[in-house]
Amino acid sequence: GAVVSQHPSRVICKSGTSVKIECRSLDFQATTMFWYRQFPKQSLMLMATSNEGSKATYEQGVEKDKFLINHASLTLSTLTVTSAHPEDSSFYICSARHQGTQYFGPGTRLLVL
Amino acid sequence: ELKVEQNPLFLSMQEGKNYTIYCNYSTTSDRLYWYRQDPGKSLESLFVLLSNGAVKQEGRLMASLDTKARLSTLHITAAVHDLSATYFCAVGGGTSYGKLTFGQGTILTVHP
């Protein structure tokens, strides 16, 4: 099956710093990728849709200036959490659709101190 | 706004027993997914259901879809400890290509 990777798998940062998370489709091209956030013991919530070569589409309530998304190639989307705060601590998961199935990355656990 | 509701949210089972997890959704959709998530891990795809009456089985798990009732079920047969995990259903497709709306998740614990 198709593989989606994420890097890093976990990151700890200080409050006020920015963190970049990469999402790659390893064996297929993805013009669209999706970014989800999952708080402990909760479900996944869609944050934004990343579109190759154009602006991302953000879900209601998600600050686009805080969560910067760049989809510069058909296999790479990045999510940058700017000026991170402790409340941004969460599990961030990306996904991409390939041949009718959604494939999820392994996730990135972010802890903001 | 699409809403997806699962029940039960918590399920404690004995090994060898059968049980069903239900997933209701509020608007029509062209596909329904079931995922498994182990603690600290990402999602593992279990089933994709595409049409009314679709039934898929893998091992002790069987999923079905009734698009008229907007209901999917995940049936567990003769549960074993290895099935302990959180199970999510998700609905997507249509004009929201690739976007998924998830249910709350069902935490399944299988006891010896």
Image (cartoon, rainbow, N blue to C red):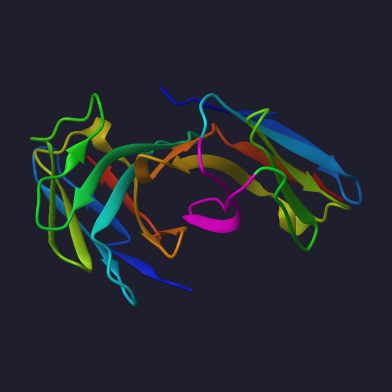
The image position of residue A37, as x and y in percent, is: 34, 41
Q: Is residue A94 above or below residue A63?
A: below
The image position of residue B64, as x and y in percent, is: 72, 45
| Residue in the picture at 62% in, 47% down | B51
Horizontal side of B15 relative to B30 (left or right) equals right
Horizontal side of A28 relative to A79 (left or right) equals right
The range drawn in magenta is B29-51
Q: Is residue B33 above or below residue A101?
A: above
Q: Quadrant of residue A57?
A: top left
| Residue in the picture at 26% in, 31% down | A59
Is residue B38 found inside the magenta-colored segment of the image? yes
The image position of residue A4, as x and y in percent, is: 36, 66
Q: Quadrant of residue A52?
A: bottom left
Is residue A47 found inside the magenta-colored segment of the image? no
Horizontal side of B20 relative to B72 (left or right) equals right
Q: Work out whether residue B43 or residue B92 is closer to the camera in this orientation and state it.
A: B92
Q: Work out whether residue B96 or residue A9 is closer to the camera in this orientation and state it.
A: B96
The image position of residue A86, as x and y in percent, is: 23, 33
